[in-house]
Image (cartoon, coloured by chain):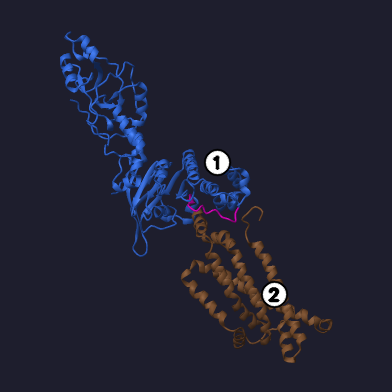
Chain colours: A blue, B brown
Amino acid sequence: MIQILSEGDGKGMLLSMEHLTKVYPGGKTAVDDFNLEVEKGEFICFIGTSGSGKTTTMRMINRMLEQSSGTIKINGEDIAQMNPVKLRRKIGYVIQNVGLMPHMTIRDNITLVPKLLKWPVEKRNERAKEMIKLVELPEEFLDRYPSELSGGQQQRIGVIRALAADQDIILMDEPFGALDPITRESLQDLVKDLQEKSGKTFIFVTHDMDEALSLATRVVIMSYGKQVQVDTPDNILRHPANKFVADLIGQDRLIQARPSITTVGQVATKAISAREDQTLKQALGEMHTKRVDTLLVTNNEGKLTGFVGIERLNHYYGSGKRIGDIMDSNVFYVRKDSVIRDTVDRILKRGFRNVPVIDDDGKLIGIVTRATLVDIVYDALWGEADKSNSNDSGQTKETEDNPDKEAGKTESQAEVTQTTEDGDQK
Amino acid sequence: MINFFNQFGSQLIFKTWQHIYISGISLGLGVIVAIPLGVVLTRYKRISGFVIGLASVLQTIPAMALLAMMIPIFGIGAKPAIVALFIYSLLPILRNTYLGMENVDPTLRDAAKGMGMSNFQSIMRVELPLAAPVIMAGVRLSATYVIAWTALASYIGAGGLGDFIFNGLNLYRSDLILGGSIPVIILALVVDFLLGRLELLLTPKTTEEG
């Protein structure tokens, strides 16, 4: 299952890989028809089990390996036509075992590529100072040798060595694999920060899913040389392409990620509602049969216009008015594509027992109840999937309660794409 | 002793010079040929086994036989001796160069290449400096061998301190034997010491203190 995210001829793309295949002598296919377009400033993570071809793919980008077929273009230029040595000087390279030259000072290590590019000495020294500040190490370190630094410090130098000559693309091959978790985390933060500040393009190979999900703007999941899924971390968490991806992510992570990726629309349960033009008698009948004390009110197009509670209904009963006349139009609602994480606080703080959910057209598509939120929080905390995918309607038969009197205009800032949730009303 | 110096003093200095000259040139040629060859072999691993094997075979030829074999080709004198000793000096240097280069951490070779070093730059700036101690060990070993065997080269008329030893053997004069062999030993020790200092000099610093 190959997913080509963006079509096109690769123009304007910083890096484009087309139908890349690598067959090793002996017939083992390490990479099979790999396609990827990378824009400037992206942080791409290749992730997969060992032998999935992720490192092989990465090493073809700086021609440490030659592909068997397919093309790689950087800024539209086929790298097969370029001098490999010159190409590599334009591409930063960070490897798992750091690979600092033990017989060179930290300064010489940092400025290794600038020296190859024949920068003048002063400029090189200046760059070394600039760079070491970037990774929060003291300037005195410049005169030391790699063996005098800790593993984490060495890899910090390894990272800035790859940036020192203003390379546009930085390749990282499991750079933090050999570090302890605490050091690894601080380096991840550092790299993410450097990447965001510099706007450079990173290609990062890892087998650590947490690392991939927290660093990447897009994740390329590979298995046996094939791309399984290429997407943003959010989308991968939300829609794992298949069981392999889901397993790779892990059940725990999928559940824990739920509040931050699940949209309100996905968990909304069916709302009990009435139309504006219905009579109060009809409304009371509806309340009675559904055992609720509040009805949401929609117009004929299904748009949410207000709500009406039992007291008000009682007050006006027999006056011959329609629901639309007596309803309270001051209703708090959330949009279906806001994510749960952003919504929970708002719902809980205002003390609502439930909140109507509307789609982009303002149509009522359901409600989120406190019981739904409890399910999600429970799952996130206890990790148990509990079989309930918590988006089936009907598991919460709650009394419709009055969504208080407070003015409730909510605008959802979450711009994530939503799954289908038809807005049909009864 | 003083008697010996009075009688052979000037001769001793001359023969010592000859000895240094013959072994120095042989070793120098050995270094010039074996180190680059060893480096090249690391880039053509398929033939490395064959070449190092060949050098090992040459090493097994008895020194005396090899010297004698040079006579039909080069006649007698210093020239055949230098060629024979050169052949002897090859193997330790060649093997150590190859091993030293091979033992450089592959990560570093990968890093050097990935950074954009050409093959030549990788060799000169990374691999040779890091392999220097091992290569120098080979050179020191060769130097000791060559200085010792240069004494044998006197047999084919090359001169050197071996002249004293062979004369001493022929004339049953132990003072001549000792007068030849002791300087050879001293020479070997001094050269080894000097090369040891050179090795330290060539071994790259990896800590601030050195």
Q: Is residue A368 above or below residue B197?
A: above
Residue at image mark 2: B188
Q: Residue A207: tell me if it is visible.
A: yes
| Label 1 secondary element | helix
Relative image position of residue A323 (x, y in whole percent): 20, 14
Q: Residue furthest top?
A: A319
Chain ID at mark 1: A
Q: Are marks 1 and 2 on the same chain?
A: no
On whether residue A98 falls in the magenta region, the answer is yes
Q: Is residue B163 above or below residue A300?
A: below
Span of residues in magenta: A91-104
Amino acid type at circle 1 is Leu
Relative image position of residue B98 (x, y in whole percent): 54, 68
Identify the residue at image location x=59%, y=66%.
B134
Position of A106 with respect to A402 (left or right) is right
Marker disc for residue B155: none
Position of A223 with respect to A121 (left or right) is left
Name the main secondary structure of what is drawn in magenta.
Answer: loop
Residue at image mark 1: A134
Relative image position of residue B131 (x, y in whole percent): 58, 63
Which image quadrant is residue A259 in? top left
Question: What whole-number distance in Å separates the C-alpha atoms at marks 1 and 2?
Answer: 54 Å
Identify the residue at image location x=61%, y=76%.
B89
Q: Is residue A250 above or below residue A330?
A: below
On whether residue B160 falls in the magenta region, the answer is no
